[in-house]
């Protein structure tokens, strides 16, 4: 019996199975830094040049997420990312469709309720242009689509799991919603962006940042009920972006929409209480994931 060989084999197995420690604070610090280092200068640049800086900044969370995973030394973490990106066969498409229908109904309810505050039913029409300028209609459509794809690689590739490793999904959604919302902050100062257009009224700006919190819960719901699929979140995020851009809702109605989204979020959390408040995954998210498989 080769004792040294057995010891070497055991050490090798222990290294392979070594538990990975998520670093959410470092992730957000890096994601914010490498986004804002491009977005802040864009405030002072012409729109045509600023657009390039904004796009590079948009890439930051996805790049940081991918780097964190690639240098983690964890084969399980790398395999998990692969499964979340290309595991098409695991996506529960009925759940994705349900989430899209729910959001469409949120918009319908918001417009109908806004009539009580003097808004028009003409908001059910489609807009001809996008709310941001400098890239043209085709460029705007590509931007909305790419934004959804790129963001979700970052937020679902590493970010949400890194928070969920340390708390239940209710508090994870709260923390993520706040940090994700505030990540957009420099955009309100960059001419031509949707966020800059909100500066005509402080209420609109406040509403934008508050709305990110209940949306954090909804996107987490989509993520979890779709077997932690990045693809599912990309599709949902893209549809939400398009609906928010192309449905002719006024900013007043979008304030109403935030209230409706919050009420729907409460309903989802109550219905999915076991999912949002379970703690079985805390401290062992990857282990729980691969045991289930």
Image (spheres, helix red, strand yellow):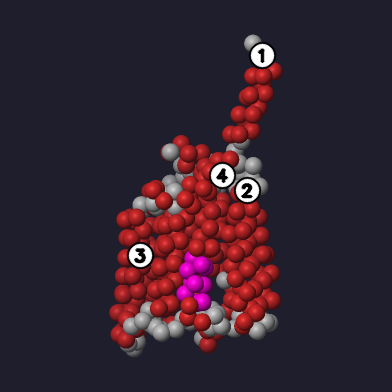
Q: Earlier in the sequence, mark 3 or mark 4?
A: 4
Mark 3 lies on residue? 100
Q: CA distance from mark 2 to mark 4?
A: 9 Å
Mark 1 lies on residue? 2
Mark 4 lies on residue? 77
Q: CA distance from mark 1 to mark 2?
A: 35 Å
Q: Residues within 10 Å of mark 2 (few under 14, many from 20)?
A: some
Which quadrant does the N terminus fall into?
top right
Q: CA distance from mark 2 to mark 3?
A: 32 Å
In the image, residue 37 above or below residue 123: above
Q: CA distance from mark 1 to mark 4?
A: 32 Å
**Residue 198, image x, y percentages:** 52, 82
**Camera-side residue of 204 and 102:** 102
Front position among marks 2 and 3: 2
Which quadrant does the C terminus fall into?
top left
Q: Is residue 254 visible?
A: yes
Q: Earlier in the sequence, mark 1 or mark 2?
A: 1
Residue sitting at 63 percent across and 24 percent down? 10
Q: Secondary structure at mark 3?
A: helix
Q: Overall secondary structure of the magenta stretch?
A: helix
Label disc, if present, on residue 70 of the rendered structure: 2
Q: Earlier in the sequence, mark 3 or mark 1?
A: 1
């Amino acid at each position: 019996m080769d004792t040294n060989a057995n010891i070497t084999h055991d050490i090798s197995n222990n290294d392979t199975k070594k538990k990975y420690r998520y670093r959410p604070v470092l992730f957000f610090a890096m994601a914010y830094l490498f986004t804002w280092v491009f977005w802040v200068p864009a405030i002072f640049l012409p729109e045509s040049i600023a657009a390039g800086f904004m796009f590079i900044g948009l890439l930051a969370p996805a790049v940081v997420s991918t780097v964190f995973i690639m240098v983690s030394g964890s084969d399980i973490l790398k395999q998990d990312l692969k499964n979340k990106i290309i595991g098409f066969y695991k996506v529960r498409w009925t759940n994705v469709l349900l989430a899209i229908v729910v959001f469409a109904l949120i918009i319908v309810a918001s417009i109908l309720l806004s009539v009580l505050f003097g808004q028009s039913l003409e908001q059910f029409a489609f807009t001809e242009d996008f709310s941001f300028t400098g890239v043209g209609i085709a460029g705007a459509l590509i931007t909305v689509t790419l934004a959804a794809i790129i963001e979700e690689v970052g937020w679902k590739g590493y970010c949400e799991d890194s928070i969920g490793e340390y708390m239940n999904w209710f508090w994870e959604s709260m923390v993520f919603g706040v940090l994700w919302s505030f990540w957009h902050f420099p955009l309100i100062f960059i001419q031509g962006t949707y966020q800059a257009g909100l500066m005509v009224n402080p209420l609109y700006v406040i509403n934008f940042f508050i709305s990110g919190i209940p949306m954090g819960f909804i996107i987490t719901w989509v993520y979890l009920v779709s077997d932690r699929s990045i693809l599912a979140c990309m599709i949902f995020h893209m549809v939400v972006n398009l609906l928010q851009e192309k449905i002719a809702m006024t900013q007043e109605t979008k304030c109403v929409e935030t209230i409706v989204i919050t009420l729907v979020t409460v309903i989802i959390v109550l219905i999915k209480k076991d999912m949002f408040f379970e703690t079985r995954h805390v401290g062992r998210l990857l282990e729980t994931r691969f045991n289930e498989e």
